[in-house]
Amino acid sequence: MTVAVRVHNPFFARVWPVFAAHEAKAVKALRRENLAGLSGRVLEVGAGSGTNFAFYPESVEMVVAVEPEPRLAVKAREAAAGAPIPVVVTDETAEEFSDEQQFDAVVCSLVLCSVSDPGGVLQRLRSLLRPGGQLRYLEHVASAGVRGQWQQLVDATFWPRIMGNCHTHRDTERAIVDAGFEVECARREWTLPVWAPLPVSELALGRAHRP
Ligand SMILES: C[S@@+](CC[C@H](N)C(=O)[O-])C[C@H]1O[C@@H](n2cnc3c(N)ncnc32)[C@H](O)[C@@H]1O
């Protein structure tokens, strides 16, 4: 069943391109690593302002990039024009998106925190992959201890409201396994010193495939 979801976050859509343009070198390196070695047809979900596009290897035949937030979709199309590989941007949500041909890979970066039903979206993405096709993910995730409590507090108060429905305390690695993916490799990374209070500085980077 297709779930109708409207994504309209005008404040976030104004600030995100600024954040993305000033990302730390460490985050850029993780983006590049997340996309390394990809080939064939790739689906990128929630492309934002198209920050990943510059990092795709030339072995990728084409990227279909889903970005439903209207202001960000405009930015993504601008980034697509300068990308090293062909990129087509569509305004659909992950929930609505369908394609007649299955994809060789699906890329999620900093997006499974923002969808309303990550488990449902992951199942849909699995169905859009050919058997053996890879899910590449770079997602900030629930931390342990005091930082995890801080994440729960910000999620219950202001953070999703100003950050485009971003939820910082999600067990995304568990959701990937529960959606039927087989994880090939995964690790966690910190993009800021551990003491920094930003609730999104612990990232999970991994590769999984549709069995
Ligand atoms: C934090 S931004 C990340 C953008 C980009 N993936 C990146 O790595 O820079 C989250 C993105 O997910 C998009 N998004 C939110 N809900 C979505 C949905 N249901 N389907 C597809 N994209 C969605 C937002 O519009 C936003 O562009």
Image (cartoon, helix red, strand yellow):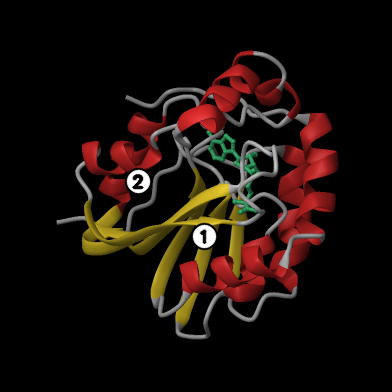
The residue carrying mark 1 is 64
Separation of residues labelled 1 and 2 (CA atoms): 13 Å
The residue carrying mark 2 is 125
Where does the C terminus fall, quadrant-wise? bottom left
Please name the amino acid that badge 1 sits on.
Val
The part of the image, by quadrant, that contains residue 98 is top left
Residue sitting at 81 percent across and 31 percent down? 10
Secondary structure type for disc 1? strand
Residue sitting at 64 percent across and 63 percent down? 27
Asked whether mark 2 and ligand 1 are closer than 8 Å, the reply comes as no
Q: Nearer the viewer, mark 1 or mark 2?
A: 2
Across and down, in percent, residue 77 comes to 72, 59
**Residue 188 in the image: above or below residue 14:** below
Where does the N terminus fall, quadrant-wise? top left
**Residue 114 in the image: above or below residue 49:** above
Answer with left or right where residue 148 lies relative to residue 78: left
Q: Nearer the viewer, residue 8 or 101?
A: 8
User: Does the image show residue 136?
Assistant: no
Mark 1 closeness class: few <14, some 14–19, many ≥20 residues within 10 Å = some
Across and down, in percent, residue 166 comes to 61, 31
Spot the residue most to the left. Answer: 211
Residue sitting at 56 percent across and 33 percent down? 114
Q: Which mark is residue 8?
A: none
Answer with left or right where residue 116 lies relative to residue 171: right
User: Does the image show residue 161?
Assistant: yes
Residue sitting at 71 percent across and 21 percent down? 161
Mark 2 closeness class: few <14, some 14–19, many ≥20 residues within 10 Å = many
Across and down, in percent, residue 104 comes to 33, 67
Please name the amino acid that badge 2 sits on.
Leu
The part of the image, by quadrant, that contains residue 37 is bottom left
